[in-house]
Structures are given as C-alpha cells and as structure tokens.
C-alpha cells in the first residue's frame, strides 16, 4: 500500500503513457543514408542536453529513415536514454528521429509533460539498478512500462513542475555565468602569461612563444623549477586506507586510480603525465595547484617554482598550455609526458612584482568562479531534496 496522499494515484508507467517506443540506426557504413534534413538523435545528444533538446550532431535522409527502424517523434516528446548512461531525460523542441538507445514517451493525457520529465528524472538511479549488464548496461521498454509512477491531480502536477523548473532555471543561469567567467579567466591567463598585453620593447624568445617583453625571462623547466618526483615517499597500505578521503588526491587524470600513492606536504604544482587528456587542452587544465598535506600518484609530476619564477606563476602559466607535441609514445597507443619531455618545456615569466599583480587578478577570477560553483552545487542539492519531497507527496503545494 502506497504512502501517497489520498488524491494521488500510483500507476505503472505503461498504464498512463499510450506508447513507449524506441528507434533504430541506418547502416553506419552507408554514407548515402546520412546528411539529409532529418535530425538524428543519439545518446550523447541527450546527455549533453539540458531539459530541452535544442541541438543535434547528425542528420539522416528519407532513405535512411525508410531503411531503418528510426522513427520521427514530434516536438514536445519526452526522451529517455536506455543504454550506457541510463535514465537521462530531455524534451524535444523540434521533430527528430531517434536511435534504438532512446525511449520516446508518446501520448500521456493524464500527465503534464514537465511533471513526467521530473518524475522520470528522479528515477535515474532506479533505472540504472534495473539495467542488465551485457556489453553495456541497458534497460528495455518493458522495464519502463512496469515502472511505478505517482500521479497527482493535474493542477498539482503543474505546480510541482513549475517549482522544480524554477530551480532548474536558476541553476542554468548560474551555470551560464560560470561558463562565461571560465572563458574570461582562460583567455586572461593565456594572454597575460604570454605578455600579450605588454606594449613596451620586445625580444625574440627563440621558442614557440615568439616575441615576449624584453624584460621577461624564458627558461626551460629545469632552469626555473625544482622537479621533485624523486622525493616521493610511498604510502603504506594501512595509511592509504586510513587517509583516503581525508587528504586531497591527485593523479594523471581526475579519475582516482590510487596507483602507488605518495605523501607530500607544502605547495607544489602537479602535471599529469597522461597524454590521452592533453589532446583536449581546450577543456582540460594541464596543471593543478596542491597545497598542505596531499596524496599523489606516480602518474603526476611534482614541481616547484624556483629562481625568480613563483610557484603560483608556474601553475597559471602551465594551466592551459598545449603540451601535445611534448608527448612521447608509450606502447602502441598511449602517449605520456615523461620527465625528459617535461625538461624540454619552456616557461616565460616577468619580474616578481609583475607576477604578483597578475596572480592576484587570476586568484580573484578563480574565487568568483568557485563561489558560483558552490552555489550551483547547493542549488542542485536543494532540487534533489525538494524533488524527493514533492514527487512523493511528503510536501504538498498550494494550487
């Protein structure tokens, strides 16, 4: 027996949605089926979308549609991913064809569209648990049809959706502002750490930087930094288990692989050696600034600014560098930034007082972005909590 309010009904999704269907894919090796005027949606179109789908990457033509199981769904159709990343939802804003990994919910007169969106969004973890594991996790239309769903009266559905939509709008605005500030910060760091704004006398650096301010220095990493990989002190298994989650962890990527961890204390700049991510330098931050007590894997170089190059300047000057041409091949497919490669990288830097001035500006930008990021996290937590209460009827709304 459900604990929903007496005015609510608990139904199976298949009882209140007239049709739950999926599409298909034209033969990928036949280019004659692609490039037409019909938008063709795949999983990554959904996962990269916000609540409303407004863009797509691939199109097909009428022949591709007729020679496959792909189906065109109208604007205002709720879609849900069934393979890989399961349970991600969006609402179409234009007619589009879908592949077999996407479920379409067609016809639900008793359920308001946005309410259905939030009701299914809240069940993403349930769908992931229900998925079968073959080559990749997936759920079927049959599982979706058997999914229980709470159905309040329509006015209450609309009010619930309106409240949750309001939080989504606030999150979207904060996220857009954060992206804007990220772009400004990235551009400022790239330009200012290369001396682009300096209008005085310049000299040829003899490196990829070209002409730089005449009073700036350009040195190889070993000449302006201390590479302290050799100071790594292995962490014993007992200590690793005891400190995991207490001290920050850094590796080659943001994936915590915890391979051969070492303990450090102080201020350092870390550069991951995993070249698989360096090709995405427009999105990936090359360097990390670590301070205090932290653990690091053997897949990150540990360096410290020396000479007249401050540690913070070193961090910012390496942050968005394209280091792809410094990578060396390891095995058949993997590339890495070896210690020898690291030693061939140049760093340019101004006198200490100019470094300090720009670092203050960069730090201020970073703090403003962090404040926004914290706000977004809090808003998302609020939405999760409120969604749980509203969609279960524990918290009622006035209509």
Image (tube, helix red, strand yellow):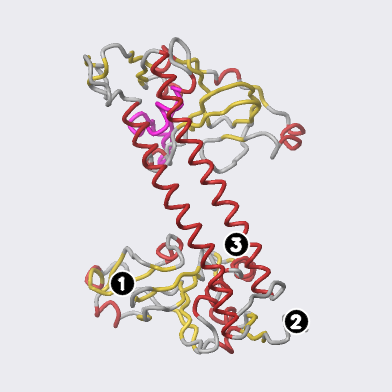
Q: Position of residue 229 (x, y in %)?
A: 55, 21
Mark 1 crowd level (few <14, some 14–19, many ≥20, 10 Å Cα): many
Q: CA distance from mark 1 to mark 2?
A: 41 Å
Q: Which residues are magenta?
A: 313-338
Residue 286 left/right relative to 219: right
Q: Is residue 320 above or below residue 64?
A: above
Residue hosting label 3: 383
Task: Tell me: residue 193, above or below residue 391.
Answer: above
Q: Position of residue 399 (x, y in %)?
A: 60, 80
Q: CA distance from mark 1 to mark 3?
A: 32 Å
Mark closest to the chain's N terminus, 1 or 3: 1
The residue that mark 1 highlights is 39
> Marks 2 and 3, how far apart in space?
23 Å
Disc 2 target residue = 2
Does the segment drawn in magenta span residue 280? no
Depth check, front residue: 24 or 280: 280
Depth check, front residue: 310 or 177: 177
Mark 2 burial class by Cα count in 10 Å: few <14, some 14-19, many 20+: few
């Amino acid at each position: 027996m459900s604990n929903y309010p007496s005015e609510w009904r608990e139904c199976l999704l298949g009882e209140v949605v007239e049709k739950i269907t999926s599409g298909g894919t034209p033969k990928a090796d036949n280019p004659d089926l692609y490039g037409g005027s019909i938008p063709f949606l795949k999983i990554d179109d959904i996962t990269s979308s916000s609540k409303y789908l407004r863009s797509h990457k691939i199109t097909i033509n009428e022949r591709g549609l007729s020679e496959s199981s792909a189906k065109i769904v109208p604007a205002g159709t709720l879609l849900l991913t069934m393979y890989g990343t399961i349970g991600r939802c969006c609402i179409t804003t234009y007619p589009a064809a879908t592949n077999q990994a996407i479920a379409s919910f067609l016809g639900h007169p008793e359920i308001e569209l946005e309410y259905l969106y939030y009701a299914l969004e809240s069940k993403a973890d349930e769908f992931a648990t229900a998925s079968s594991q073959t080559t990749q996790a997936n759920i079927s239309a049959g599982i979706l049809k058997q999914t229980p769903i709470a159905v309040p009266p329509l006015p209450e559905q609309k009010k619930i959706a309106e409240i949750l939509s309001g939080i989504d709008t606030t999150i979207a605005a904060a996220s857009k502002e954060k992206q804007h500030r990220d772009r400004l910060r990235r551009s400022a760091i790239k330009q200012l750490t290369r001396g682009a704004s300096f209008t005085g006398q310049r000299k040829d650096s003899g490196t990829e930087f070209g002409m730089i301010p005449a009073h700036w220095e350009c040195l190889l990493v070993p000449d302006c930094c201390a590479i302290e990989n050799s100071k790594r002190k292995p962490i014993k298994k007992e200590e690793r288990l005891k400190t995991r989650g207490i001290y920050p962890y850094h590796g080659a990527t943001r994936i915590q692989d915890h391979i051969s961890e070492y303990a450090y204390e102080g201020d350092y700049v870390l550069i991951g050696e995993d070249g698989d991510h360096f090709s995405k330098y427009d999105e990936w931050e090359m360097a990390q600034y670590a301070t205090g007590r932290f653990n690091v894997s053997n897949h990150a170089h540990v360096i410290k600014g020396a000479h007249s190059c401050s540690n913070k300047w070193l961090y910012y000057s390496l942050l968005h560098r394209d280091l792809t041409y410094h990578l060396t091949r390891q095995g058949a497919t993997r590339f890495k930034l070896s210690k020898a490669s690291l030693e061939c990288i140049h760093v340019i830097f101004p006198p200490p007082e100019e470094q300090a001035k720009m670092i203050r500006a960069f730090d201020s930008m970073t703090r403003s972005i962090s404040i926004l990021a914290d706000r977004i996290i809090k808003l998302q937590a609020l939405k999760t909590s409120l969604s749980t209460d509203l969609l279960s009827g524990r918290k009622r709304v006035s209509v």
